[in-house]
Amino acid sequence: MATPEKPEDISDYAGFVTYRVSQLNAKMSGQATRLLREHGGLSQVQWRLLALINVSSPVTSAALVKSIAMDAGQFSRTLKALIHNDMVKSKVDENDQRRQVLSLTKKGLLRYKLAAPLMKERREALMHGVSKADREAFFRVLDQLENNLVEQEVTP
């Protein structure tokens, strides 16, 4: 007999929230990667950084890395590539020489604007058929899962 600790077969994993979230994330990431590559020549991580810089600009790299919940190494490599490819401009903060302030260049803003409508359409399509009440409940559940993770990190 299947138990949560030992599934009887692979179909039992469908009842595990971690499995379902992981599978959904993989599918959404794959779709986003394909769309961005085909229509904007961007990676998903590059898109996220461009989008966050666009709405937060000017923003420090420290504030951005804190808000994006991404591996610091991947963040750094992606940011360096965006700067190298003239999509993001980095300058030293006038008030604190240790901080870098980021903004989009004209090229970065153009790439963002080319991909933004596609990504908005994708987000809307993902939520097609989901009522406002279900969406609100879904986000409450996600918030609770995040809270549970934070509590588990504190409590052994």
Image (spheres, rainbow, N blue to C red):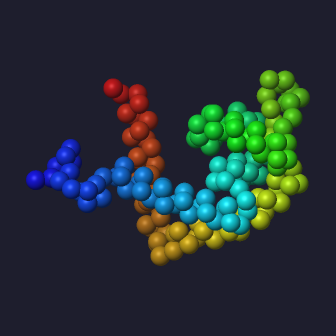
Image quarter of the C terminus: top left
Residue at the image point whose x is 44% and y is 59% from the top: 24
x and y percentages locating residue 30 in the rendered image: 54, 59
Can see residue 5? yes
Direction from residue 86 to residue 36 in the image, left or right:
left
x and y percentages locating residue 148 in the rendered image: 39, 40
Question: Which quarter of the picture shows residue 21?
Answer: bottom left
Question: Which quarter of the picture shows residue 107?
Answer: bottom right
Question: Which quarter of the picture shows residue 91?
Answer: top right
Which of these two is toward me, 14 or 61? 14
Which of these two is toward me, 20 or 150? 20
Residue at the image point whose x is 48% and y is 56% from the top: 26
Direction from residue 22 to residue 122 in the image, left or right:
right
Residue at the image point whose x is 37% and y is 56% from the top: 20
Residue at the far bottom in the pictured view: 129
Residue at the image point whose x is 56% and y is 63% from the top: 31
Q: Relative to 126, is 9 above or below? A: above
